[in-house]
Image (cartoon, helix red, strand yellow):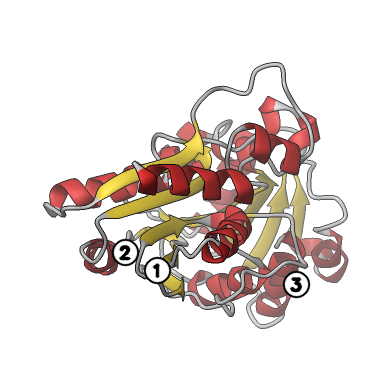
Amino acid sequence: MRGTFIKTLIDLASNDPRIMLLTGDLGYMAVEPFRDKFPHRFVNVGVAEQNLVGIATGLAESGFIPFVYSIGTFASLRPYEFIRNGPILHELPVRIVGVGGGFEYGLNGITHYALEDIGIMRVQPEIVVIAPADFEQTRNALLATWDLPGPIYYRIGKDDRSIVRGLDGRFDLGKPQHIRSGADALILTTGSISLEVVKAADLLEEDGISNEVVVVASFNPPPVNCLSSVLMEFPIAFTVEAHYISGGLGSLISEIIAENNINCQLVRCAVTSIPRGISGSQEFMNESYKISGAEIARRIVKELKS
């Protein structure tokens, strides 16, 4: 997704001189095309994420549209107070781009695992929060939102090859995308883990379990009405996310069920413990923390039987 994001940003910047790209000494093999094409609109502030957001806030107040690019944990956690007190408080068009949700930086260890970024961002009013599922949806999400008046947090992945079957790049701010129809179970997912959800759905279909799959790429604004309607159609729903179990998609769906008095049992598939002392490939980590396609399918079968 990151390569597609930068290519799309170049297209937009070619027509709008307000767009700038800032990085905290990260993004090599991704941001260079923008740097080479617009050297005077690219700033590497070094390993100083609070300054990164502070500079972007000043640029936005001066009429620019700055995009701040870093690994998910560094983009969201290190400068969090600066995001809150800068672009959110002052309603400025700073775009925070957090790369590598969940375990995408698997071999780098827990410091690079973005497992709480959606939760801490969506709790702030008036920041748009978007987590595309694949590179096609990433492009359309950026095209649809880049010029919104306030701040945005984009949680994007690293994969620029895989597509989520049935999604076809669709994105509508404040709405979910249905990618598969079924009657036995409802599966809601977000971000690049959607690829594993499609694998799980295929395994379930082989066992005769029909499932509806919905991608939720928009958190702020949350697609409350659309999700309420689909939740009312199922006695049980499953959320799957590469995120801690609290604060993200599972929490959003729990809030919608509770506040709208919906008679639907919810099962949350997410990371439930801190990954201390363990690292490995993204595939290994997803399997270890039970959010791989096979583990998701096993959990759904178990819950349906019970």
Mark 2 lies on residue: 223
Asked which secondary structure carries label 3, the reply is helix
Residue 80: give x, y in percent of width and height: 50, 35
- Out of 264 and 244, give the one closest to the viewer: 264
Which residue is the extreme one toward the left?
261
Mark 1 / mark 2, whichever is N-terminal: 1
Residue 97: give x, y in percent of width and height: 61, 53
- Out of 129 and 249, give the one closest to the viewer: 249
Residue 154: give x, y in percent of width and height: 55, 56
Q: Is label 3 in contact with label 1 (beta carbons under 8 Å)?
A: no
- Out of 13 and 124, give the one closest to the viewer: 124
Q: Is residue 292 above or below residue 50?
A: below
From the image, which quarter does the N terminus lie in?
bottom right
Q: Quadrant of residue 66?
A: bottom right
Residue at x 44% of width, y 42% of height: 302
Q: Is residue 169 above or below residue 35?
A: below
Q: Taking the image as drawn, is residue 129 in sight?
A: no
The number of callouts visible is 3
Mark 1 lies on residue: 176
Label 1, residues with CA under 10 Å away: few <14, some 14-19, many ≥20: many
From the image, which quarter does the C terminus lie in?
top left
Which residue is the extreme one toward the top?
277
Residue at x 55% of width, y 36% of height: 115
Between the C-alphas of marks 1 and 2, the distance is: 6 Å
Q: Is residue 66 above or below residue 58?
A: below
Mark 3 vs mark 1: in front: 1
Residue at x 79% of width, y 38% of height: 281
Q: Is label 1 in contact with label 2 (beta carbons under 8 Å)?
A: yes
